[in-house]
Amino acid sequence: MSKSHEIRGRLCAADPHLAPILPPVPDVHMISRSLLRAGRRVWCIALLQCGSASATAPDTPEPTLREVLVISAPLPDTTIDVDRILGNVRTLLAEDLGSSPTGELTDVLLGRVASVNLADNLGSEFQPDLLYRGFAASPVLGTPQGLAAYQNGVRVNEAFGDAVNWDLIPDIAIRRLDLVSANPIYGLNALGGGVVIRMKDRFSDRGADAVLSGGSFGQRSVTAQAGANDGRAGIYEAIRGLDRTGWRQHSSDRLRQMYLDASLHVGGLTADLSYTRADNALAGQGAGRCRPWRSIGHCRLPGRRESAIALISWP
């Protein structure tokens, strides 16, 4: 006998008149078994409904997502429609560089691209500060850099300070230059945009030429480029050398640049190996206060600023 029936029996034995008044006490074990059976029925019904719903539901096709190509650096031979670029794009070719009197990359940008300005903080025409819409690409450490420069897909900004040494880029070997306004694909410190330089190779540029020149203040220069290919493999080389004493004291310059490219074209496969070398020694006079020296009416210029830079790179 359960405990509930035992309590009811005691109450009825104590007072027989309470028997018809007290309601029957249900058995706890019976209630728990009934609840368990009811729960099992509900669980089975829910499973049957889920199975019927999944069996009768129509097959909905998965949504197809549009493929998005993310490029970490402007690699060579990757073409993008200009209309898809949200910004201004200016393009210069080798013919534009050749038509310039100086042939310097920065001078051509100044003369042919709007919103470009140059500053001469180092006192050398080979190391200017390039300003595009207020954003700088400068060789001076400490300048807030806002332009990224790429040569054949390799970033040429220095690892320390993101400075750009324009004298290390062989201008004679440039095939194409694109100046693109602000775009996130050019990486860090490219808030103002990117300068994308594509160099020459034997398949895109044919022939050979050499130029010798000289002038006042001890200026002597030589530029030469040549190459050959057999339809599958090709080699291209360009060199540039310049020496001058300068039009004032302590302002001599020495420039040595070389670019070498080996190309292989087999079917749809294209492989290029490029090598850049530069060894320059540049000196420039900086602005300063004139200090009397020895006698009245004579001034001594501030000491010269020398910049000796060497580069060897192969992407």
Image (cartoon, rainbow, N blue to C red):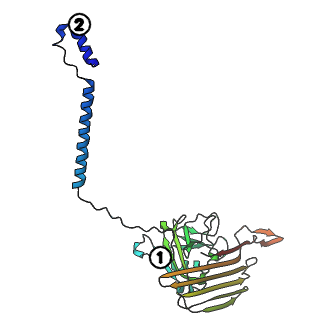
**x, y percentage for residue 239?**
65, 85
Foreground pick, 264 / 254: 264
Quarter of the figure with residue 99:
bottom right
Q: Return the residue at label 2.
A: 14
**x, y percentage for residue 229?**
56, 90
Q: Residue at x 69, y 89 (%)?
A: 214
Foreground pick, 179 / 15: 15
The answer to whether residue 146 shows anywhere in this view is: yes
Compared to residue 127, the image places residue 65 above or below, namely above
Compared to residue 171, the image places residue 17 above or below, namely above
Q: Which residue is most to the right? A: 294
Q: Which residue is most to the front? A: 1
**x, y percentage for residue 207?**
57, 92
The answer to whether residue 103 shows anywhere in this view is: no
Q: Return the residue at label 1.
A: 78
Q: Residue at x 33, y 64 (%)?
A: 64
Q: Residue at x 58, y 77 (%)?
A: 106
Give the Cα separation between the discs numbered 1 and 2.
102 Å
Q: Residue at x 26, y 46 (%)?
A: 47
Is the residue marked by circle 1 packed among few (<14), some (14-19), or many (20+) residues within 10 Å? few
Amino acid carrying label 1: it is Thr
Quarter of the figure with residue 17:
top left
Viewport quadrant of the N terminus? top left
Q: Is residue 80 left or right of residue 106?
A: left
Amino acid carrying label 2: it is Ala
Q: Which residue is most to the left? A: 20
Is the residue marked by circle 2 packed among few (<14), some (14-19), or many (20+) residues within 10 Å? few
Element on which disc 2 rests: helix
**x, y percentage for residue 272?**
56, 80
Element on which disc 1 rests: loop
